[in-house]
């Protein structure tokens, strides 16, 4: 084959590859955003989804540089939430916010979740009324303290099979979120609140929020990692 012809063919191949990669860079992030939006929309209303990846072809293997999701109202249980986060494990960075989330029996607002590598952080606001509505009839809780990655509350009503007022602590334990009462009689009792094979809970926190003209409640925080 003449050298000139071989050079033209090689040049044409290079141009074709560049065009294909350029087209992929434009199209694949949009396709990925549509796919993610469809997954999240199973649980409620989605405002926007954006995806970045360089090179975009790595999206074909489930990897991405960043994913940003904005939602309005979502309704899902804790296991469904963990599954949704696990689906984004290939993204280096994930930013997800929602105006309102019905997480099992508890309604949350101002929800945000961040993922950096395998590290997860989440926070949300729960009004005192919504916390009360999520509890069994006749039961109430009040925040006592939050320190060292755990939350202590005073609970009144039927908790741990006892109709009384006591102090209970919620904390991370070997990747699980557990609650246990303090005291001699029930000191050995423990209730698992959340456990998932893909989410290792590291710590939780809470603080009381009370401002003039605003609903009182609690700012909730959680730190975890994917595994």
Image (spheres, rainbow, N blue to C red):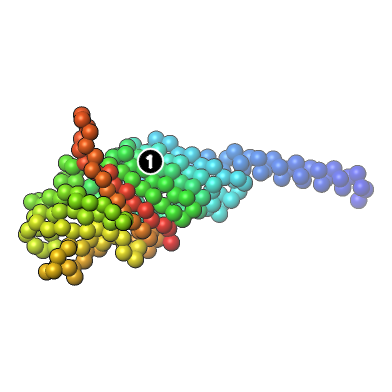
Between 91 and 9, the one lying in front of the other is 91
Residue at (22%, 51%) from the top-left corner? 145
Quarter of image, res 70: top left
> Residue 222: x percent and y percent?
34, 51
> From what the image shows, is residue 53 above or below residue 117?
above
Residue displayed at 22% across by 58% down: 169
Outermost residue, top side: 213
Q: Position of residue 160 (x, y in %)?
A: 14, 63
Looking at the rendered structure, the secondary structure element under dot 1 is strand
| Quadrant of the snapshot with the C terminus | bottom left
Residue 131 as seen in the image, left or right of residue 33:
left
159 relative position to 148: left or right: left
Question: Residue 224 location in percent, x, y?
Answer: 38, 56
Does any portion of residue 182 appear in the rendered image?
yes
Q: Residue at x 54, y 47 (%)?
A: 65
In the image, farthest residue toward the right: 2
Residue at which label 1 appears: 97
Tell me if residue 3 comes above or below residue 215 in the rendering: below
Q: Residue at x 15, y 46 (%)?
A: 132
Q: Position of residue 17 (x, y in %)?
A: 71, 45
| Viewer-side residue, 63 vs 220 | 220
Tell me the quarter of the picture where residue 171 sits. bottom left
The quarter holding residue 172 reads bottom left
49 left or right of 189?
A: right
Instruction: Identify which residue, 16 or 205, lies in the foreground.
Output: 205
Q: In this rendering, does residue 41 appear at all?
A: no
Q: Residues within 10 Å of mark 1 (few under 14, many from 20)?
A: many
Front residue (pair 60, 152): 152
């Amino acid at each position: 084959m003449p050298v000139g012809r071989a050079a033209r063919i090689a040049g044409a191949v290079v141009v074709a590859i560049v065009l294909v990669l350029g087209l992929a860079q434009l199209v694949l992030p949009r396709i990925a955003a549509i796919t993610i939006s469809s997954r999240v929309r199973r649980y409620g209303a989605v405002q926007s989804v954006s995806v970045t990846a360089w090179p975009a072809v790595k999206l074909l293997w489930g990897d991405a540089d960043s994913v940003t999701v904005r939602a309005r109202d979502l309704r899902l249980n804790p296991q469904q939430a963990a599954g949704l986060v696990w689906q984004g494990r290939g993204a280096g960075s994930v930013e997800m916010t929602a105006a309102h989330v019905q997480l099992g029996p508890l309604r949350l607002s101002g929800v945000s979740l961040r993922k950096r590598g395998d590290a997860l952080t989440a926070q949300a606001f729960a009004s005192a009324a919504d916390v009360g509505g999520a509890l069994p009839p006749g039961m109430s809780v009040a925040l006592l303290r939050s320190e060292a990655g755990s939350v202590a509350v005073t609970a009144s009503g039927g908790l741990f099979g006892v109709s009384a007022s006591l102090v209970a602590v919620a904390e991370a334990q070997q990747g699980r979120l557990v609650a246990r009462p303090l005291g001699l009689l029930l000191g050995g009792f423990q209730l698992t609140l959340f456990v998932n094979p893909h989410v290792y809970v590291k710590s939780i926190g809470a603080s009381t929020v009370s401002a003039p003209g605003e609903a009182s409640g609690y700012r909730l925080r959680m730190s975890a990692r994917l595994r």
